[in-house]
Image (cartoon, grey):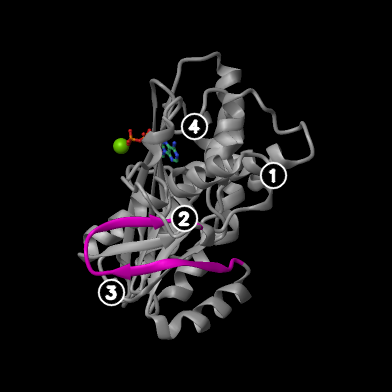
Amino acid sequence: MEFRLIDRIRERTAQGREDVKLGIGDDAAVVAPPAGQELAIAIDTMVEGVHFPHGTAAADIGWKSLAVNLSDLAAMGASPAWALLALSLPVQRAEQLGAFIDGYADGFAQLAQPHRLALIGGDTTRGALTISVAVHGFVPPGKALTRSGARAGDVVLVTGTLGDAAAGLQLLRRGARVDEGDGRATYLIERLHRPTPRLSTGLALRDRASACIDVSDGLLADLGHICEESGLGAEIETELLPRSSMLMASFDEVSVRDFALAGGDDYELCFTVPAALVAEVQSDLARLGCGATRIGRMVEGAGVRVRDAQGQWLEAAQRGWDHFA
Ligand code: ADP
Ligand code: MG
């Protein structure tokens, strides 16, 4: 692949780290994992038209392609260190490709730099616009948060607010633009394009959360994974679901509820905590800047059940992101 393009990526994402012995530019990167730590490794692929709409700005794609991976590390309680990037780019005129690469690398770097994440290598080919990012993070031995440790009686919590990203996608499909209106569309579309991985929350949950997952496919689907892996059920209350004022001001009550329950792309953390620890965990997380809301509890049984404000059980099939596809 053209070296000029790779050089542009390298320049724009430069991040000095002592543990990177050899970064972009050789046949393989060489890193020195810290003694006494375990490696947490994740990869996610994004395809234009499937994982982000056609016409999404290159910088937003750069940010989000890293954010979804950092969110996976957050859900494991790991701290990020290194990334690999595989880019498949459509054949375009050279200057268009250059502009895309610059925008992509800038969006990527905007998120990578505050976390001191180093891009250490990758691969670049021609093809449909497809981006795979792999990340590596550190976690103390045996301390990774998993989906499988929840106990009956544990409280279910979620960070931030739910449903904003799915609402943003809906607005884009209706032709909304970020620069119109009173800021509501801007906020919701930003939540879609620029999710915030909850890394410091993930670290704070080590030793305290019994299970954790990031909400990428929608709360019902992702909490469903905790249920399956923990051999339990969950009961949640719709009126406890954290929803932004921007979301509530933009859609009717039923849409808001469905976005919060089943909308994807939130990248909040959903986790379970023994009841005795909830108050302490909530005040610690609030101090970190992203609070967490209790939304229900783990119970004997299987699957996620949802109770509405009137105490009625909703039909709670795991709808997930496909519901909106
Ligand atoms: P090779 O043919 O030996 O696999 P490449 O020409 O594909 O080497 O890559 C040259 C160098 O550039 C390698 O260090 C590789 O990791 C890096 N690289 C290639 N594409 C990217 C990319 N999209 N992002 C970051 N590094 C890349
Ligand atoms: Mg080679």
Q: Quadrant of ligand 2?
A: top left
In primary-sequence order, the first of circles 2 and 3 is 3
Query: Cβ of disc 4 within 8 Å of ligand 1?
Result: no
Q: Amino acid at mark 3?
A: Ala
Q: CA distance from mark 2 to mark 3?
A: 21 Å
Q: Amino acid at mark 1?
A: Ala
Please tell me the numbered disc located at residue 308: 2
- Crowding at mark 2 (Cα within 10 Å: few <14, some 14-19, many 20+): some
In the image, is residue 146 above or below residue 111? Answer: below
Residue that label 4 marks? 52
In primary-sequence order, the first of circles 1 and 2 is 1
| Secondary structure at numbered mark 3 | loop
Q: Nearer the viewer, mark 1 or mark 2?
A: 2
Q: Main secondary structure of the magenta part?
A: strand
- Crowding at mark 1 (Cα within 10 Å: few <14, some 14-19, many 20+): few
Foreground pick, 263 / 90: 263
Determine the image quadrant of residue 256: top right
In primary-sequence order, the first of circles 1 and 4 is 4
Q: CA distance from mark 4 to mark 3?
A: 37 Å
Please tell me the numbered disc located at residue 249: 1
Mark 2 and mark 4 in contact (Cβ < 8 Å)?
Answer: no
Q: Which residues are magenta?
A: 290-309
Mark 3 and mark 2 in contact (Cβ < 8 Å)?
Answer: no
- Crowding at mark 4 (Cα within 10 Å: few <14, some 14-19, many 20+): some
* Residue at figure coordinates x 34%, y 48% from the top left: 316
